[in-house]
Image (tube, rainbow, N blue to C red):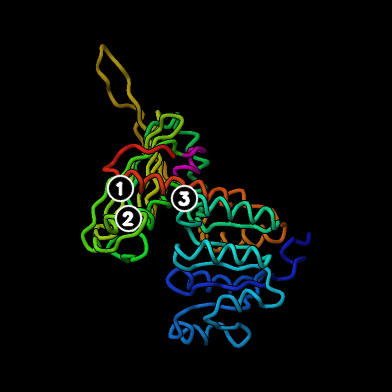
Amino acid sequence: MTTMRSQQAPIDLALFGAGRWGTHLLRNFLAHPQIRLRAVVEASEERLAAIAPEVGSDVALVSDWRSAMAIEGLVGCAIATPAATHSELIQTALNHNLHVLAEKPLTLEVASAQALCVLAEQKQRQLMIDHTYLFHGTVIAGKESIAHMGTPRYGYATRTHLGPIRRDVDALWDLAIHDISIFNYWLGESPIRVQAQGSSWRQSEIRTPLSPRGLADVVWCRLQYPSGFVATIHLCWANPDKQRRLCVVGEKGTLIFDEMNKDAPLIQQWGDFVENEGWFTPQNISTTTIQVPPSEPLKNVCDRFVESVQKNQPSDISSGQVGTALVSVLVALSSSMNNNGDWVTC
């Protein structure tokens, strides 16, 4: 049987941003049989010179993004630039009738994210957000496994490391979206109200509309879901204790995604209680390791973006609407943090 991939001609794409994350997109685009990279846009001339041997003479290396969008035959673009630039770049790309794959977060404001979704629908173009963890084989397996844990009761996550420290957004906007997207995906619901508190040590002088007290280095978040499930998240980019761990506690046990455990990143720890005359004794204690076939999440993102463009159908996992919902949660968390940890409705 002939597959869709062999029937379809490669789609012509431009990459906007060849920095830390754009480099990974560049590698995947160059290797993808259904993508023909036409241009890389990067403000740094030094960075353009560095990637020139890698991309070859058929790929235009430019610093002017407007000229790249005007390339004849261009079908779509990937945007891996600072979050503050997303709104203008995505709007311009959609108005050029280009499909868009955007790095997270979609934008820094709910209204602009919503407007981009409306524009994409009007232009009949696909807007997909690179929430890479939603394409992670372990996270997908976790979605299937959580049904066996009984009713979810609460969750917790830790995402800490020593740099890189950003100067455009705080640790909340840099890190929280990963764990929130996983909780939302596993639970099949979004938070209804949130709470956050944070501290800034290194960049308290950098003030933004979202961070009027400076860019927070450490943040603690609480998310309350319609079902009553509550998740707590610890975020820090100034902690050498690197952790990437997310857990959901259910009535029959706990599902654990520990990205730092390379041998067993996804496990189920089982256990409950037997009651005898008012005393509770643990029972049925065991651990199950869930085997997950290896794959690169970002390659899966690229595959799904190509499929979305070829079929001209929204991604069922990470559409613009999904990205907008996550922006709404982050905005509410920032509002809570700026108001001394008050609960804020999403």
Residue 30 screen position, x and y as percent: 58, 75
Give the labeled residue for mark 1.
Answer: 338
Secondary structure mainly formed by the magenta segment = helix
Q: Earlier in the sequence, mark 2 or mark 3?
A: 2
Q: Residues within 10 Å of mark 3 (few under 14, many from 20)?
A: many
Residue type, numbered disc 2: Ser
Give the labeled residue for mark 3.
Answer: 327
C-beta proximity under 8 Å, tags 3 and 1: no
Q: Earlier in the sequence, mark 2 or mark 1?
A: 2
Element under disc 3:
helix
Toward the viewer: 6 or 184? 184
Tell me: 9 left or right of 81: right
Quarter residue 267 falls in: top left
Residue type, numbered disc 1: Asn
Q: Residues within 10 Å of mark 2 (few under 14, many from 20)?
A: some
Q: Which residues are magenta?
A: 183-190
